[in-house]
Image: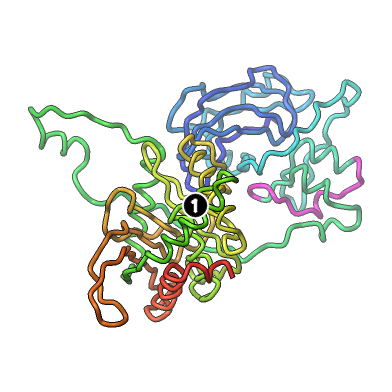
Amino acid sequence: MPTEILMPALSPTMEEGTLAKWLVKEGDEVSSGDIIAEIETDKATMEFEAVDEGTIGKILIDEGTEGVKVNTPIAVLLEEGESGDDIGSTAPPEKKSEAATQEADEQPAPAPKAEAAPAASAADTTPAPAAPVKDGQRIFASPLARRIAADKGLDLTELKGSGPKGRIVKADVESATPGAAKASAPAEASPAPQATTAAAPAGPDAEQVRKMFDGREIEEVTLNGMRKTVAARLTEAKQTIPHFYLRRDIRLDALLKFRSDLNTQLEARGVKLSVNDFIIKACALALQAVPDANAVWAGDRIFKLTPSDVGVAVAVEGGLFVPVLKDAEQKSLSALSGEMKDMASRARDGKLAPHEYTGGSFAISNLGMFGIDNFDAVINPPHGAILAVGAGVKKPVVGEDGDLTVATVMSVTLSVDHRVIDGALGAELLKHIVDNLENPLGMLA
């Protein structure tokens, strides 16, 4: 039977997207791994790969269509031997019955780019076996998966699919061996409760606001996907996360001198370290020193991370990204500097892949370069904390000998999720961050 190709969720926060461009037309044959469309998500424009092989029988959503909900049918894929006449029973997306919606095979978000499967040869004309049935229920499997299973002598009723709704896909049958199908099924992890998107805050709607400014010159700005996502996630954060705030001043003079000396030595390599690079390293090491604070909230439990995966907020046109520097505690300052510059550049160009801006337990938001002395940042769910960094400014301070002197002082505020980190634990984490930055040589030990 014809298979519906559904609008995929190409990022963790995507609820709808724009079908920017079709790269195939009706009648084209596609194989698993072929790129068939470009889809604009809430973060970037991404390529969408075919999961199954077959022929594009009908395109349901025209390119350029905005606001296409995730899991909405966008095209119909025909199996071998089927024709356009078989599509007649396919109802338009908005008129599909509930049963039909439940039966639709969901398309998963593509994994990191893999080599496209070769197109079927002319000799490969064997129709895919019929869909198997177990206990009166149809076992959903892609045509390619059914054909490979038949060639390998696998019983699909004994396989557990890794696709949406348990659908068996190519990877499941390729990794299975006859007689060991059950063992090949991926282990089920305890599911963390799914985060819900926060409802829009109560308040006047657009028309009510428009009336307030009747007769005044205004410009109406339509929200793009990124701005909608930022609004929803930060509303969720402030409504559901019990924030508390810890503040410290950090003397930067030792760090600034150390940074200057290092940059002089690294100049021949074209490396120039920023203060932010030191802050990333300081936070990564602090999370290792206080492992209980290296954690995220997961609904009814807490997940503690072993590595220090640190996110850094990057402002882009129309919103922001939080690229995540993974295993930051293990990387040198120059490696962190190069990776951060690369990710920030690609974030501004909308070229970051979803796995590069998801995960992590901790984030940094630095507005010091804009002259902001101090501020409170909003936690990025499910992170346990975020460090807001202000500018380093000259201030009068009392030295260790009691004399009044001048030092470069940077104010930081640690916003903490009280469900994950208690006050004393948060204070210990911030103390380690401060110690690392005031004694930078120790970060290289």
**Badge 1 density bin: few <14, some 14–19, many ≥20, Cα 10 Å:** some
Magenta stretch in the rendered image: 151-165
In this image, 278 relative to 188: left or right? left
Q: How many marks?
A: 1
- Quarter that holds the C terminus: bottom right
User: Residue 320 at what x, y percent from top left?
Assistant: 40, 44
Specify whether residue 226 is painted magenta.
no
Q: Secondary structure at mark 1?
A: loop
Does residue 178 appear in this view?
A: yes
In the image, 36: left or right of 359? right
Res 417 → quadrant: bottom left
Residue sticking out furthest to the left: 215
The colouring scheme, among rainbow, by chain, secondary structure or one colour, is: rainbow
Q: Which residue is mark 1?
A: 273
Q: In the rendered view, tell whether residue 156 sits above or below residue 395.
A: above
Q: Nearer the viewer, residue 98 or 205?
A: 205
* In the image, residue 389 above or below residue 24: below
Q: Residue at x 41, y 72 (%)?
A: 430
User: 209 or 398: which is nearer to us?
Assistant: 398
The residue drawn where x is 56% and y is 43% is 270
Answer whether residue 160 is magenta in the image: yes
Looking at the image, residue 241 sits to the left or right of residue 179; the answer is: left
Specify the quadrant that holds the N terminus.
top right
Question: Which of the 4 image quadrants contains residue 239?
Answer: bottom left
> Where is residue 387 shown, x and y percent of the image?
39, 62
